[in-house]
Amino acid sequence: MTGTCFLPITQSLNHSMATFKRTASAVWRGSGAEGSGSLTGPSGVLNDTPYSAKLRFQNEDGKAGTNPEELIAAAHAGCYIMALSFRLSGAGFPPSELRCSATIDMEKGDAGWGFAKITLHLEASVPGLTADQFMEHANAAKAGCPVSKALAAVPIELEAKLL
């Protein structure tokens, strides 16, 4: 599966739509440094979920609250392994399990904070697949994942392990 993954996904799910939209909203109150906000999405996973500069920049382990980078990392990991699963299944190798985490390295430059790189950490259990086939599919899914495409301005690395 190369290019956009909308057509193969809609075909395998028997949907007739070729496009869709996803939304989320944010509310911010107060100054950048002292203010805070909330995030909401229609699924209910984000339901007035709090975030703030303090939670974002002064909370090293990230456990006190969410932040935009955590949400982007989760979206990237989830989109990537879904794209990989469709790709592997389409090639006749349905995975037993795929596990992925995404790490966003941030750096502060003259223009402010930015993404230095994103690393996808993949562990996969795929019966009947050789290591070379695995890496071919893993790299193609990384290139074809819609979130990877949206983040194309950032270097994206893949650390993949076939179990």
Image (spheres, rainbow, N blue to C red):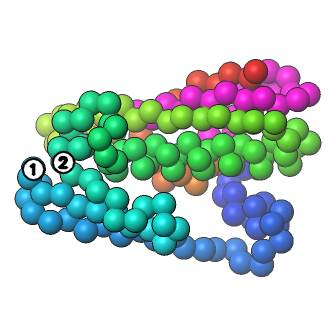
Magenta-drawn stretch contains 160 = no
Instruction: Judge by depth and name the residue closer to the eye, 161 or 154.
Output: 161
Instruction: Judge by depth and name the residue closer to the eye, 9 or 31.
Output: 31
Q: Position of residue 102 (x, y in %)?
A: 50, 36
Q: Residue at x 69, y 40 (%)?
A: 140
Q: Dividing the picture into quarters, in which one does residue 6 lie? A: bottom right
Query: What number is the disc on residue 122?
Result: none
Q: Is residue 22 above or below residue 152?
A: below
Q: Position of residue 100 (x, y in %)?
A: 60, 35
Which amino acid does the dot numbered 2 rest on? Ala
Task: Decide: few, some or many residues near mark 2? Use Cα within 10 Å; few <14, some 14-19, many ≥20.
Answer: some
Q: Are marks 2 and 1 in contact (CB under 8 Å)?
A: yes
Q: Position of residue 43 (x, y in %)?
A: 52, 68
Q: Residue at x 70, y 36 (%)?
A: 98
Left or right of residue 99, residue 31 in this image: left
Which amino acid does the dot numbered 1 rest on? Ala
Q: Residue at x 66, y 58 (%)?
A: 4
Magenta-drawn stretch contains 135 = yes
Q: Which residues are magenta?
A: 117-142
Q: Is residue 91 above or below residue 134?
A: below
The residue that disc 1 covers is: 33
